Image: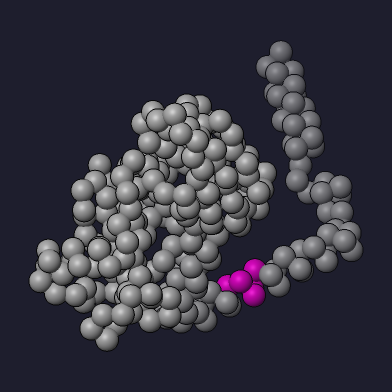
Amino acid sequence: MRNFKKISLFLVLNVGFVMANPLEPQNFIAPSQQELQQNQSQKIDDLKANSFYLNLDPKDINAIQKKDEEVRNAFDRFSQKEINYKPVIRPIASMDSINLHPYFTTTILLPKGSIISHIDSSNSMAVLKYENNAILIRPNQDFKIANFTILYKLDDENKILNVLANFYEKNPLDFQDKLNLVYSYSNTPKLDGLEVLSAYVKEFGSLPKQEYSFIQIGDISYRIVKDDKYGNIMRGGNKYRIDNNTIYR
């Protein structure tokens, strides 16, 4: 009986060895030509990649990282810090200009009490809605430029506002140039350039010395730009142009 157990154990172990034997002929089948080519190609690619990274100069790595960041910024055109969620207050006029971006919905608020009756857009928009004195606009992905003609009534008088909308692009020379998401118009007359420049001199005692200067008059903030090319006011040997740019509530 004891011998029978030994024989049985030997047979079980032997069968297991045969079944799991890694030296079986089927485990030594030669790889196909396609497999050989794939392995060789993978080894060559790995060697090229390793050689590229080993031979990289640290200065080249910094340049590549900087270029990658520039490409990302070129696609997005802005970062989070360049977005202004607070209302920009502007005096109501018959013409104005704003910036739009396809990633965001922009709100336009006409003076309190205004009732919008119609809006015509020169280009189709992803979103263009209005109610009472509020307008919601979001352009399509291929947006570049558009013109909006807004018909509204204020104090029982029919009025019109033409708005030129441009694709937002960051101005690297103007740190206050942001993508504004809310434009709020006040029923306040807009001052002309000479009045604004005179107010600045009275307030600060001299003409603006910076390329971009600001002065707040009432609820409106005016931006004074030294602009030799497009400036229409000549003072102190410099050309200036003035617009109502930004004020934050």
Q: Which residues are magenta?
A: 46-50
Q: Quadrant of residue 119?
A: top right
Which one is in front, 75 or 115? 115
Q: Does the magenta-highlighted stretch encompass residue 119? A: no
Seen from the viewer's position, the closer of residues 152 and 213 is: 152
Where residue 231 sits in the image (x, y, percent)? 38, 75
> As drawn, which residue projects farthest toward the right?
33
Q: Position of residue 31 (x, y in %)?
A: 85, 58
Q: Quadrant of residue 40?
A: bottom right
> Extreme front residue here?
157
Q: Nearer the viewer, residue 157 or 40?
A: 157
Residue at x 70% of width, y 24% of height: 9
**In percent of the image, x 50 and y 71: which residue is there?**
67
Which quadrant of the figure contains the C terminus?
top left
Residue 217 x/y as whole percent = 21, 53
Q: Residue at x 54, y 38 (%)?
A: 151
